[in-house]
Image (tube, rainbow, N blue to C red):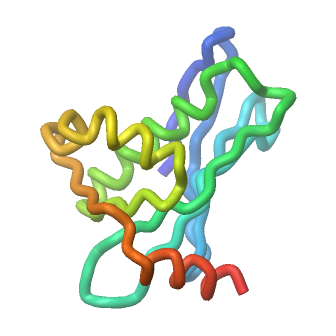
């Protein structure tokens, strides 16, 4: 997945997904420069879930709407892949608390994180 977008200043932005086994990331780049990421794991098991656990945008790119673009692309990709989002990352949790009904109406699925999800993130990072 690679999406070409435009940030709030009119500059070209690219969002790509970089899966790497259990751990992966959605990467946002501005003119080819890595500007931020949303990290995830796809835990093993019978459920098709993606746990998004950390999102960051480099300070030099602050105020350009990159976190919002990244969040939107992650949500669209998860919906396209027919995965259930588990929002461990506070940014995604706040967004879904406010806009969860809209996400579901657009075909998205999510559930609240459980203690086992936090443990899976910890295990994946070690």
- Return the x and y of residue 50 as percentages of the image width and height: 40, 67
On screen, residue 110 versus residue 57, left or right, reads left
| Callout count | 0
- Return the x and y of residue 52 as percentages of the image width and height: 50, 60
User: Which residue is located at x 71 percent, y 38 percent?
Assistant: 29
On screen, residue 103 versus residue 124, left or right, reads left
In the image, residue 70 above or below residue 45: above
On screen, residue 72 versus residue 45, left or right, reads right
User: Which residue is located at x 38 percent, y 45 percent?
Assistant: 75
- Return the x and y of residue 84 as percentages of the image width and height: 28, 63
Which quadrant, please, contains the C terminus? Answer: bottom right
Q: Residue furthest top?
A: 9
In the image, residue 20 above or below residue 35: below
Q: Residue furthest front?
A: 115
User: Which residue is located at x 53 percent, y 49 percent?
Assistant: 90
Tell me which corner region of the image, top left, top right, bottom left or bottom right, holds residue 53.
Answer: bottom right
Q: Residue furthest left?
A: 105
In the image, residue 45 above or below residue 87: below
On screen, residue 14 versus residue 76, left or right, reads right
User: Which residue is located at x 43 percent, y 48 percent?
Assistant: 93
């Amino acid at each position: 997945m690679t999406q070409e977008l435009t940030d709030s200043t009119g500059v070209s932005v690219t969002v790509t997904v970089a899966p790497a086994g259990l751990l992966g990331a959605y990467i946002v780049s501005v003119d080819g420069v890595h500007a931020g990421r949303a990290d995830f794991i796809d835990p093993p098991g019978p459920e098709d879930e993606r746990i998004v656990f950390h999102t960051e945008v480099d300070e030099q790119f602050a105020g350009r709407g990159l976190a919002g673009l990244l969040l939107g692309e992650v949500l669209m990709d998860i919906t396209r892949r027919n995965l259930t989002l588990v929002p461990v990352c506070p940014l995604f949790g706040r967004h879904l608390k406010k806009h969860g009904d809209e996400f579901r109406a657009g075909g998205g699925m999510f559930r609240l994180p459980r203690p086992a999800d936090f443990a899976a993130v910890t295990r994946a990072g070690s």
